Amino acid sequence: YDGVGYTGTLEAIAFVRTSEPHSRWLGQKFHEGEEEENFNLVVARKNYLDVVSFPKFELLYTLQQDSDTINALAVFPDGHRVVTGAEDSFVRVWCLKTRTQLCCWKAGKYGVTAVDVSPDGTKIAAGSSAGDASVWSLDTRKEIYNSNDGRTVRWNIADVKFLPGGKSLLASQGYMNCWSFEEGGKSFHVEGGAKITIHGDRVFSSLGTENHKKCKILVRSLETQDEEFRLEGHTGQVNQVIVTPDGSRLISSSDDGTLKIWSLGTGQEEATISGNGRGIHSIILSPDGSRIISCDGACIKLWSLETREEQACYMGAPEGFQDQSMRRSAAEVTLKG
């Protein structure tokens, strides 16, 4: 990293749309064969949102909130709006087409650590450092549900996810709880950990020991909550897990500085990608599903899913992507594939 030293500058990444969504597109699920030029990358950096072209990684514009660090980021089903959760305990909704903040509200007494958007785009979920998860109406900005029943909660909420149908909320904080806030929703309490991913009829969550020396990924049936198997191999906290569109592979990122690719058919590790030098906390797949985009707090890297080779590296800086000394231009890096 040549002495850059901007640890923690880049907090989260997500894809958003540059064009109207295809009828089969929903959130981060892309229509097969759609051009990558239809998408931009949003990067949460301190109290900024950098909107960057993909795959050229040129800064298009920056949105700024008026206070503390952005901790969490989620994309609406229309692909043009995002919601952020910040250390100042506020949830903010942004429109990227108009480049404006649409609304904001205080979602508790403490920092917002996780956010999600309901499948119909009408509700926002927020997890806090106080250990409670809440659901809010986007229209009224009124709280619909709060998981806090007056208990003193030990752990932050690490992640929140709406279940398909939008009637239940899944939250993790050292274990995994599911709360029903509408009739017909699910409720359960199972072993779990940090980040959650839902794909098809399965839910994936990370689980680590107190010193994070033996970390696992749990694979469960969403219908029965039964554990199907565990993926073991990381030696640091597992920060995020994502599943390929066809459901055949899982990719995980960890504080041990590696990405791992797992077969969900066999439950075995296929490959380990090293070379980050620091913990990786955010990963997403490119719109065509062929590349992994990873973020370690100081840079964003592109990797081939098939060859596991690094294809590009873009450095972050406090001034953002405008600082050419901190970012290789598209002319300097040839993107393979």
Image (tube, helix red, strand yellow):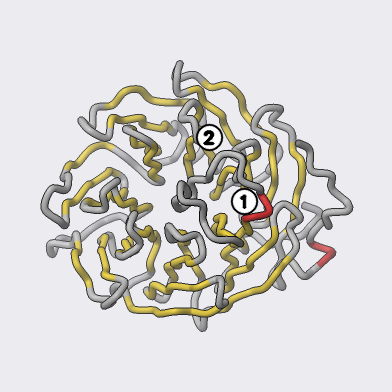
Q: Is residue 128 above or below residue 214?
A: below
| Residue bearing mark 1 | 295
In the foreground, 85 or 224: 224
Q: Position of residue 268 (x, y in %)?
A: 49, 19
Q: Position of residue 113 (x, y in %)?
A: 40, 62
Residue 222 falls left or right of residue 1: left
Which kind of residue does numbered mark 2 sit on? Ile
User: Quadrant of residue 135 in the image?
Assistant: bottom left
Which is nearer the N-term, disc 2 or disc 1?
2
Which kind of residue does numbered mark 1 sit on? Cys
Residue 267 falls left or right of residue 155: right
In the foreground, 3 or 71: 71
Residue 215 falls left or right of residue 8: left
Q: Does residue 11 appear in this view?
A: no
Residue at x 19% of width, y 41% of height? 189
Q: Position of residue 191 (x, y in %)?
A: 26, 37
In the foreground, 37 or 209: 37
